Every structure is written in C-alpha cells, then in structure tokens.
Image: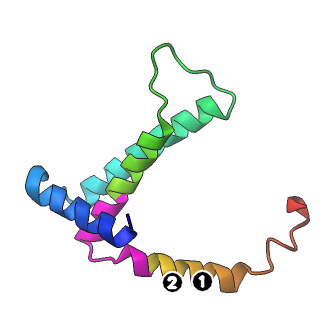
C-alpha cells in the first residue's frame, strides 16, 4: 500500500465508521499518547525496564497506531504525505549527504 492509498483508506474508514475526524488538537493529543505507548515498549524491549506481567508489547501494532493518527492529522490539514515525505527526503539528502559519513561517532 502506498502512502497515498493509506491516506485514502483512512479517510474512507473515518467517513464510514468514525462519523468524523476528531479535532486536530484531540488528534495531536492521541498521537502523543500513541508515541508514548511505542516508547513504553521500546524501553521494556530494548532498554533497561522490565515488562509487567500481562503487559501488551506489540510494537508493530503501536507503530501502526502512530501512523493511523499521523495520517488523520495529515488528511484533516490537507497535507499530501507522499509529497511531504519526498521533499523531506530531498532536504535531508542535501543537508546531510556528508554529515553522517564524516561523523567519527558513527565509525
């Protein structure tokens, strides 16, 4: 599925099952919450914290939740994520094309 297709699927789902998009501010709060859930899993799976008994640790599902809300925000603010990502990649390539290669910390 392309990013464009994902944006269309989310929009269709919202219009079919979700009644309407939550407000942009509500979606920002939800995005923060979902990123926190990713952070919790990362801290327990790759960091020093231990998992609590019965705790959910489905990183793929939590990353998909982040992507879902991010797409909702893009849709409701009129952002074409495919184009935005293309421009962002171009910016990073121009700005950082030698930065990481020359970083002694990465060698």
Mark 1 burial class by Cα count in 10 Å: few <14, some 14-19, many 20+: few
Magenta residue check for 74: yes
Total marks in image? 2
Image check: 18 left or right of 85? left
User: Which residue shows up at 88% across the image and 60% down it?
Assistant: 105
Residue tagged by mark 1?
A: 91
User: Which residue shows up at 33% across the image and 54% down it?
Assistant: 68
Residue 85: x and y in percent read 48, 75
User: From this viewpoint, which residue is outermost toward the front?
Assistant: 1
Q: Which mark is residue 107?
A: none
User: Which residue shows up at 64% across the image and 25% down it?
Assistant: 49
Question: What is the distance, in whole Å, between disc 2 and disc 1 at their CAs?
Answer: 6 Å
Q: Is residue 17 above or below residue 52?
A: below
Magenta residue check for 89: no
Which type of secondary structure does the marked residue at label 2 adopt? Answer: helix
User: From this viewpoint, which residue is outermost toward the top?
Assistant: 53
Q: How is the image coloured?
A: rainbow
Mark 2 burial class by Cα count in 10 Å: few <14, some 14-19, many 20+: few
- Image quadrant of residue 45? top right
- Give the quarter of the figure containing the N terminus: bottom left
Q: Is residue 74 above or below residue 19?
A: below
- Looking at the picture, tell me which residue is in the foreground, 105 or 68: 68
- Looking at the picture, tell me which residue is in the foreground, 28 or 17: 17
Residue 47: x and y in percent read 68, 33
Residue 97: x and y in percent read 75, 81
Q: Are marks 2 and 1 in contact (CB under 8 Å)?
A: yes
Residue 85 visible from this viewpoint? yes
- Give the quarter of the figure containing the C terminus: bottom right
Specify the segment rendered in magenta.
70-83
Residue tagged by mark 2?
A: 87
């Amino acid at each position: 599925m392309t990013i464009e297709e994902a944006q269309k699927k989310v929009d269709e789902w919202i219009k079919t099952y979700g009644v309407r998009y939550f407000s942009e501010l509500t979606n920002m709060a939800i995005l923060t919450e979902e990123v926190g859930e990713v952070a919790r899993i990362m801290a327990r799976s790759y960091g020093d914290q231990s998992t609590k008994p019965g705790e959910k640790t489905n990183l793929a599902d939590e990353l998909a939740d982040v992507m879902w809300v991010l797409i909702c925000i893009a849709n409701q603010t009129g952002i074409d994520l495919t184009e935005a990502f293309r421009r962002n990649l171009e910016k990073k390539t121009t700005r950082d094309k030698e930065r990481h290669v020359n970083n002694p910390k990465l060698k």
